[in-house]
Amino acid sequence: MTIKLVATDMDGTFLTDEKHFDRERFSRIYSYMTNHNIKFVSASGNQYYQLKDFFKDFPETLFVAENGALIGSHKKIYQTDNFSIETTQKTIDVLNNLSEIQFIMCGEKSAYILNSATPEFYEISNFYFPELTSVDDMAMVDDKTLKFSVNCPDDKTEYYMDKLSQLIGPNVSIVSSGHGDIDVIRADVNKATGLSYLSDKLNIDPADMCAFGDGGNDLEMLRYVGHGVSMQNGSNIVKKTAPYQTIDNNQQGVLQHLEELFEI
């Protein structure tokens, strides 16, 4: 097997818990990949604009953002898969009526947060969503909806995942990266569909792709590629899904595995 594309999740995978990565070490790996025409993809539930900022020094990086709803490069957005108007409004109505829930509506132009959000939620949201707009009413936003990012009490994550699935219905998929963070995404969109788009665009067979992940929103991607790698800190289902495993994110497991894989 010849690896022609490497895709990695960000939080809990490529990044340490302090949201950093070893830039000097990655730079050597990135140079090797660039010289050998191996594509590097940041595949994350995070906002496109945040991911671009993380990799501003690595201009050939590609992005599968918003859990697969937005595909692009540093220079342009290739494709977006947005919610229907009806599903957007239904999701807003459901989330507005759950008192323990706070949420972000993720659009193509910006992410949106309610003016009524707590200062703590606004502060953490501002980190993950550099393009963030405060609004009084989500229903008044004029943008394509790509995803909803939901925060709930940590110990009620599974409860709210089930509840949101029941209340919103089959047009959406409910995934979580843990710690009270839940994403509401289009049922037919995930990181694997993003990689499928790149497979067609770049003429790269999925068997020649490598991917890293730690959470439930990485499962489809890990199944899709020929070389799926779980993090040591990943969930049990991720470890069972991926045929390979590396050390944890705080020890830069992604970088170590790539160094071993490419023998550099």
Image (cartoon, rainbow, N blue to C red):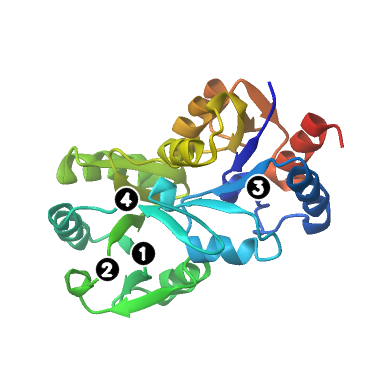
Residue designated by label 3: 14
Residue designated by label 1: 108
Quarter of the rendering occupied by the C terminus: top right
Nearest to the observer: residue 5 or residue 192: 5
Q: Is residue 149 left or right of residue 231?
A: left
User: Contact (CB < 8 A) between labels 1 and 4?
Assistant: no
Quarter of the rendering occupied by the N terminus: top right
Residue designated by label 4: 81
Nearest to the observer: residue 46 or residue 158: 46
Crowding around mark 4 (Cα neighbors within 10 Å: few <14, some 14 to 19, many 20+) is many
Residue designated by label 2: 143
Nearest to the observer: residue 38 or residue 68: 38
Nearest to the observer: residue 191 or residue 248: 191
Residue at 15% x, 59% y: name it.
Answer: 89
Q: Residue furthest right?
A: 264
Q: Could you give the CA–CA distance between mark 3 and mark 4, rounded to whole angstroms?
A: 25 Å
Q: Could you give the CA–CA distance between mark 1 and mark 4, rounded to whole angstroms?
A: 10 Å
Residue at 49% x, 37% y: name it.
Answer: 218
Q: Is residue 141 left or right of residue 192?
A: left
Amino acid under label 2?
Asp
Residue at 33% x, 79% y: name it.
Answer: 134
Between circles 3 and 4, the one closer to the viewer is 4
Residue at disc 1, secondary structure: loop
Amino acid under label 3?
Phe
User: Contact (CB < 8 A) between labels 3 and 2?
Assistant: no
User: Contact (CB < 8 A) between labels 3 and 4?
Assistant: no
Reading the chain from its start, which is encountered first: label 1 or label 2?
1
Residue 184, x across and y down, in percent? 31, 49
96 versus 142 height, above or below: above
Q: Residue 195: give its label.
A: none
Residue 14, x across and y down, in percent? 65, 47
Amino acid under label 1?
Glu
